[in-house]
Image: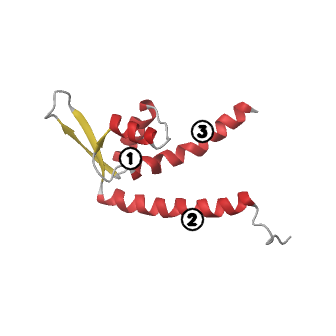
Amino acid sequence: MSEIFASLATELRRGTLTLAVLSQLEIPRYGYSLVQRLEKSGISIDQSTLYPLLRRLEKQKLVTSSWDTSESRPRKYYVLSSYGKQVSAQLKAEWQKTSLELQKLLEGDRGNESY
């Protein structure tokens, strides 16, 4: 049973990571700072998950990137594109709507059951 749970939990988490990452890219962030920011909020993400996700978001034109070479160690910064801001806002609204609907189901909309 724990194998099934782990698989379903991973599937559930996968979509939420995209929204979590997009929500943090209103301002430019480099990968490691993004990992730290998410972990501070209780969302753990491996770098081996984050960087492919960032590349996919960039390919989808939701995120743009640029290199900062002004420090001794060059860093690639990611930020939402204008299109990414629109999509992120839509995803946030969808998440909020779905969360409310799911919460009602999980709580069992007491007293309003009609079969």
Q: Which amino acid does label 2 sit on?
A: Lys
Give the residue at mark 1.
Answer: 57
Provide residue 51's location: percent of width, then percent of height.
38, 35
| In the displayed structure image, the side of residue 99 where residue 32 appears, left or right | left
Q: Label 1 crowding class (10 Å Cα cut-off): few <14, some 14-19, many 20+? A: some
Provide residue 55's location: percent of width, then percent of height.
36, 40
Specify which label sits upstream in the sequence, 1 or 3.
Answer: 3
Q: Quadrant where the C terminus lies?
A: bottom right
Q: Residue at x 84, y 72 (%)?
A: 114
Q: Mark 1 or 3, which is nearer the eye?
A: 3
Q: Mark 2 or 1, which is nearer the eye?
A: 2
Provide residue 96's location: percent of width, then percent of height.
54, 62
Specify which label sits upstream in the sequence, 2 or 3.
Answer: 3
Give the residue at mark 3.
Answer: 10
Q: Which residue is drawn at 63% across and 40% down?
A: 9
Give the residue at mark 2.
Answer: 97
